[in-house]
Image: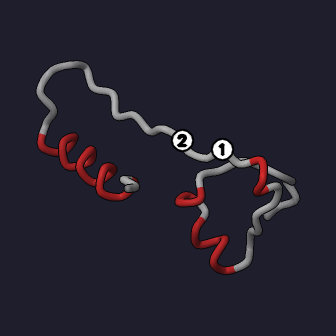
Amino acid sequence: MKGYGVFLSPAWDIREELASGELVTALDRFLPDSANLYAVTNGSPASHRVRALIDFLVDEFHQE
């Protein structure tokens, strides 16, 4: 976008730029098939806010 060249980014992070054509994909055949996302806590019961965030992430990124 500012002449930075090629970079790897999650599609969800740049979906608006991809949709508008501001960014385009390149080297698609080299993309990983999947990636993992982990929510790490300190082991104590999660607060309602943290639990809500984890639930949102599961709903947003879960693929069947």
Residue 34 percent across, percent down from the top left: 56, 45
Q: Secondary structure at mark 1?
A: loop
* Residue underneath mark 2: 35
Q: Is residue 50 left or right of residue 7?
A: left
Q: Amino acid at mark 1?
A: Pro
The C terminus - image quarter: bottom left
Q: Secondary structure at mark 2?
A: loop
Residue most toward the top?
43
Q: Residue at x 27, y 44 (%)?
A: 54
Residue 27: quadrant of the picture = bottom right
Within 10 Å of disc 1 (Cα), the crowding (few <14, some 14-19, many 20+) is few
Q: Amino acid at mark 2?
A: Ala
Residue 21 percent across, percent down from the top left: 73, 78
* Residue underneath mark 1: 32
Question: Disc 1, disc 2: CB below 8 Å?
Answer: yes
Residue 17: quadrant of the picture = bottom right
Q: Which mark is residue 21?
A: none
53 over 19 or under it: above or below: above
Label 1 and label 2: CA atoms lie apart by 7 Å
